[in-house]
Amino acid sequence: MPSSVRIVTFLRRLGVRERNPLSVMEQAFNVRPVAYTGLIKVKAHLRGLLDRLAIDRAVVFGVSGKLWQAIASLITIGVIAVCCTPETQGYYYTFLNLMAVQVFAELGLGNVVVNFASHEWSKLTLCGGNRIAGPEEPLRRLTSLGRFAFRWYAAAGAAVFVLVGAVGWFFFASSPDTTIRWELPWALFCLLVGVRLAGTPFMTLLEGCNQISSVYLCRLIDVVATSVTLWLCIVLGLGLFAPCCSLLAGVLCCVLFLFSRYRHFFRGFFRRSDAGISWRNEILPMQWRIALSFIGGYFTFYLFTPLTFRFEGPAAAGRMGMTFAVASGLSTIASTWVYTRVPRFGLLIARKRFRELDQLFYRLAFLSTTILFVGGLFTWSLAYLLQGKHPFFSTRMLSPLPMGLLFLATLGMQVSLCQAAYLRAHKKEPFLILSIVQGLSTCLSLWVLGRWYGTLGMVAGYLAVVALFALPYGTYVWSRRRKEWHRDIEQA
């Protein structure tokens, strides 16, 4: 018998019951090896740093996906610049922006599902095989919510294919450029977007049920598959068929992921009755406000490229679309810190732990805006230094001045996005007036200033709307509603 085993056996006879030999020595002699102690300290410091930065598995997956999107967008920019003409680039980004019209079919239900599901999930949990367990009442309400969402998004996907396809067909058919064959790629693109939209409630339900790590892991797989497929198809010369193949790859990856991990989770949604949540009395009061807010957001964020396409042609639309994609990508990365905690916000509100809620929100909002500011400053500085030295930045991106104004407006909007996530976790929508007025003001400024002053006028008008109206009014609404709602909940 080895001597180490004899020592452990002897110590156990003395009353030391630890199974790990190292723990036996620690308990018997109250000592730890130096290397082991150092490793423990390093691990503790690392965990403390991650806690201060609010980094967990969900954030790691979410940020990894957004970083991949940011890096992939740069690679996509290079691949398009090498393999596509400026006109094809303009059609590509206009495809993406026109497809944002699907917000009119979704009508904000995804945001409603996440917030309602998080409140019901505060009383439920997962058991073996990822099956839902808990009291009957919240389980029935959750499954009722899910079944309603499945029906809604199936109809929304069909509407996107028919209606948005028709709108895009009319838009491109009236374009002066007729050398690019866009008809069949546009039809396939609309079909696949409709299919993808029909599958949205599966992810929103999981997100509302606090399965954030799995949701963002699936999205990471999705963005990797879609971007790699897009590059291969562009290099192979498929042109505008490339985004269609990219969407198909993403849909297949999501289907396989959900079936392999959560088939038992969703099985109950197709077996239980619809009795539970009332759409008219509970969902509709929040959904119509969210819907109008999102429609206002469409006029705020998604008219830049189509109007540039209309006023200045496909090449200018490509420059605007690519620059706006970079700004939006940075904002999406920064928003990960807040959006991954939205179900947590709902749980804290349902349990009336408002102090913990505020502390968590302040820390996450500060991290989100700081990350966006640093990323935007670095990107703009790089573009400013390389402008004129590299032909890519003068032919495929906006010049430094409109780019800087666009980044400043994006930073102001980031604050409003954080405030909206906080308030919507209360299952209410207080930003309705803000979104409508901001959307109409942005649309008007884009149309007038874009027609007379081009892209510089567009981004200058956008910055003015954000700085003079959206940011101050949004902060006022957030401060007032937060105090009122918390007081009402505590009194109730």
Image: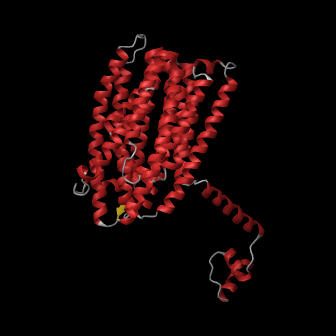
Is residue 478 left or right of 2 when viewed as pictured? left
Report the number of numbered marks: 0
Answer whether residue 125 is visible to the viewer in this image: no
Q: Hey, which residue is sitting farthest bottom in the picture?
A: 14
Q: Looking at the picture, how far across and down is residue 206, in whole percent?
A: 40, 52
Residue that appears at 73% across and 77% down: 4
Residue that appears at 32% across and 27% down: 164
Q: Looking at the picture, how far across and down is residue 11, in whole percent?
A: 69, 85
In the picture, residue 311 is in which quadrant? top left
In the displayed structure, 372 sits above or below 97; it is: below
Residue that appears at 71% across and 78% down: 25
Q: Looking at the picture, how far across and down is residue 78, in whole percent?
A: 58, 25
User: In this view of the protein, which residue sits in the foreground, 31 or 289?
Assistant: 289
In the displayed structure, 14 sits above or below 8; it is: below
User: In this view of the protein, which residue sits in the foreground, 166 or 213?
Assistant: 166
In the displayed structure, 401 sits above or below 156; it is: above
Residue that appears at 24% across and 56% down: 271
Q: How was this image coloured?
A: secondary structure
Viewport quadrant of the N terminus: bottom right
User: In this view of the protein, which residue sits in the foreground, 109 or 473?
Assistant: 473
Viewport quadrant of the C terminus: bottom left
Q: Looking at the picture, how far across and down is residue 344, in whole percent?
A: 46, 57
Answer whether residue 200 is visible to the viewer in this image: yes
Q: Hey, which residue is sitting farthest right in the picture?
A: 34
